Amino acid sequence: MRRLAFLAPLGAVLAVAAGPAAADPASVSVTLGADLQDKVRELGERDVRDQADRLAEVVRRALARSGGLDGARVDLVLTDLKPNRPTFEQMAHQPGLDGHRSISIGGAAIEGQITTADGQVLPIRYDWYSNSIAEVRGFTTWQDADRAYQRLASHLVDGRYVTR
């Protein structure tokens, strides 16, 4: 019985620590903008879908960690997407591309809106791209796009919704 005596205080501590997590987290949805839908065939449907899912996950995690925008609905529109390296679809259509040595300026543009728990609607606008090939340090196809997602999530947590 003595061995289990620590469980009661531990349970109380865990219940208190889980309090903020019990709040209704923000729901995040991502759709594709019209311009990006035109580029899906070029970039590859799977890659674009995976990037939309990645954006939603990055924003959802950042908001859950911070407790920001609890109870809000975040509707994002991925309007532009540029890879740092060729996608499988691009390499299939352009055999001269090299998946390891071909690099380019990447990034993403995102728009949308936040509907807060009290019904207020706030616009979202953010984009980030590498400025030059010299800045491309990533080794993955979507390194700069992922950096754009991380930066957007950080801005949303800080309450900066429209940045350009």
Image (cartoon, rainbow, N blue to C red):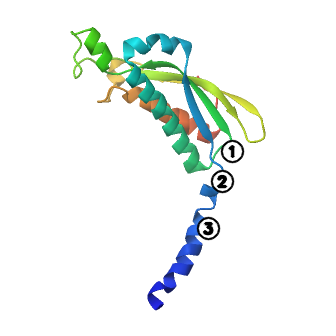
Residue plotted at (26% across, 14% down): 91
Q: Is the residue marked by circle 3 packed among few (<14), some (14-19), or many (20+) residues within 10 Å? A: few
In the image, residue 120 above or below residue 37: below
Label 3, on which residue? 16
The quarter of the picture where residue 27 lies is top right
Name the side, left or right, on which 61 lies relative to 132: right
Element carrying mark 1: loop
Element carrying mark 2: loop
In the image, residue 126 above or below residue 14: above
The dot on residue 133 is none
The dot on residue 23 is 2
Q: How many marks?
A: 3
Percent coordinates x, y for residue 55 in the rendering: 49, 32
Of mark 3 and mark 1, the one earlier in the sequence is 3
Q: Is the residue marked by circle 2 packed among few (<14), some (14-19), or many (20+) residues within 10 Å? A: few
Q: Are marks 2 and 1 in contact (CB under 8 Å)?
A: yes
**Residue 34, visible in the rendered structure:** yes
The quarter of the picture where residue 49 lies is top left
Element carrying mark 3: helix
Q: Are marks 3 and 1 in contact (CB under 8 Å)?
A: no
* The one of 113 and 103 positioned closer to us in this rendering: 113
Mark 2 and mark 3: Cα distance apart in space: 12 Å
Label 1, on which residue? 71
Name the side, left or right, on which 122 lies relative to 136: right
Q: Amino acid at mark 1?
A: Gly
Q: Amino acid at mark 2?
A: Ala
Residue plotted at (26% across, 13% down): 92
Mark 2 and mark 1: Cα distance apart in space: 8 Å
Q: Amino acid at mark 3?
A: Val
* The one of 80 and 95 positioned closer to us in this rendering: 95
